[in-house]
Image: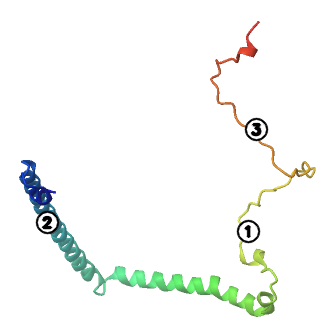
Amino acid sequence: MGYSLKLLDPVPAIAQTLLTTGWVLGAVTAAAVIVGTAGLLLTALRDSSSSLRAGVGGELSEQVARAKQAWLDALLEHGILPFLREALADPGSAALGRPAQAPSRIPHLGYGRPGFSSPDGGPAADPRPSFSSPDFTNPDFERPEHQPE
């Protein structure tokens, strides 16, 4: 803005103020970027050195590796292999478009789905739903035709 105002023939007094303000804010921004980058670099260096120390044959890394392998084995044995065995037992169900047998693949959690019908079958379906708009009037307001007697 300051440079564009300097293009005018009588240079306004605010032009130099805008230039100075812009350069000061630019310098502050550059300093903040440098400080932030240095802090990020120092944090990364500090964290990488501590992870290298713990990762050099430490007991924690061995426990993590065993836990990861146990998790992968359990996932394979209890998740993937039963699914593949069931799919191989009935290979034509997916090709014929028949619905998959969901109860055998999904565990029962101890509760059922809500019923979406009433016990007596419910009211007959209308072609259009009915709607009555809410009354947005003050409770103390009474229309002129409803004056108290």
Near mark 2 (Cα within 10 A), the count class, few <14, some 14-19 or many ≥20, is few
Q: Nearer the viewer, mark 3 or mark 2?
A: 3
The numbered mark, 3 or 2, whose residue comes first in the sequence reads: 2
Which numbered marker is on residue 30?
2
The numbered mark, 2 or 1, whose residue comes first in the sequence reads: 2
- Can you tell which quarter of the image residue 143 is in? top right
The residue nearer to you, when weighing 23 against 85, is 23
Q: Nearer the viewer, mark 3 or mark 1?
A: 3
Which numbered marker is on residue 132?
3
The residue nearer to you, when weighing 24 against 14, is 14
Q: What amino acid type is highlighted by mark number 3?
A: Ser
Residue 110, above or below 121: below
Q: What amino acid type is highlighted by mark number 1?
A: His
Q: CA distance from mark 3 to mark 2?
A: 62 Å
Q: Residue at x 81, y 44 (%)?
A: 130
Under circle 2, the secondary element is: helix
- Can you tell which quarter of the image residue 138 is in? top right
Q: Position of residue 41 (x, y in %)?
A: 19, 74
Q: Position of residue 63 (x, y in %)?
A: 41, 81
**Horizontally, is 106 left or right of 122 in the view?**
left
Q: What amino acid type is highlighted by mark number 2?
A: Ala
- Quarter of the rendering occupied by the N terminus: bottom left
Q: Which residue is mark 1?
A: 108
Q: Position of residue 52 (x, y in %)?
A: 25, 83
Under circle 3, the secondary element is: loop
Which numbered marker is on residue 32?
none
